[in-house]
């Protein structure tokens, strides 16, 4: 699949993230940090998160996006 994402325009890749059923239902989606940086860039993702009112966290090479505008609390 990595060959397909290399050919995919960044805007389409971003759209696919937020078109996922989990995202549409207000859940979470997860992507590898290196894929985000390679395909769309961190700045573009952050801008889209702000536009949508969503939050994200990064840990162990993964970015977890909370597809709702509820507050995020780190438990420990």
Image (cartoon, rainbow, N blue to C red):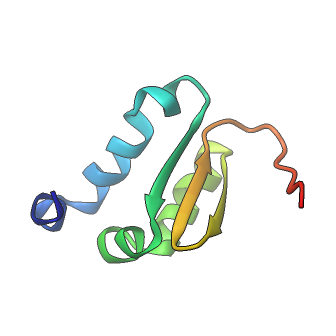
Residue pictured at 67% horizontal, 36% vertical = 68
Residue 10 coordinates in the image, percent (x, y): 28, 61
Residue pictured at 60% horizontal, 43% vertical = 52
Horizontal placement of 18 versus 54: left or right? left
Residue pictured at 64% horizontal, 54% vertical = 50
Occupied quadrant, residue 4: bottom left
Occupied quadrant, residue 7: bottom left
Q: From the image, which quarter does the C terminus lie in? A: bottom right
Residue pictured at 60% horizontal, 32% vertical = 27
Q: How many marks?
A: 0
Given residues 1 and 54, the one toward you in this image is 1
Occupied quadrant, residue 34: bottom left
Against 4, is 58 above or below?
Answer: below
Horizontal placement of 66 versus 7: left or right? right
Given residues 53 and 61, the one toward you in this image is 61
Residue 15 coordinates in the image, percent (x, y): 35, 44
Residue 13 coordinates in the image, percent (x, y): 29, 53
Q: From the image, which quarter does the N terminus lie in? A: bottom left
Horizontal placement of 53 versus 46: left or right? right
């Amino acid at each position: 699949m990595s060959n397909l994402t290399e050919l995919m325009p960044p805007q389409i890749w971003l759209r696919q993230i937020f078109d996922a059923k989990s995202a549409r239902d207000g859940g979470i989606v997860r992507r590898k940090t290196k894929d985000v940086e390679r395909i769309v860039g961190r700045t573009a993702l952050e801008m889209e998160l702000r536009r949508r009112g969503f939050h994200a966290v990064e840990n162990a090479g993964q970015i977890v996006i909370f597809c709702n505008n509820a507050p995020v609390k780190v438990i420990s």
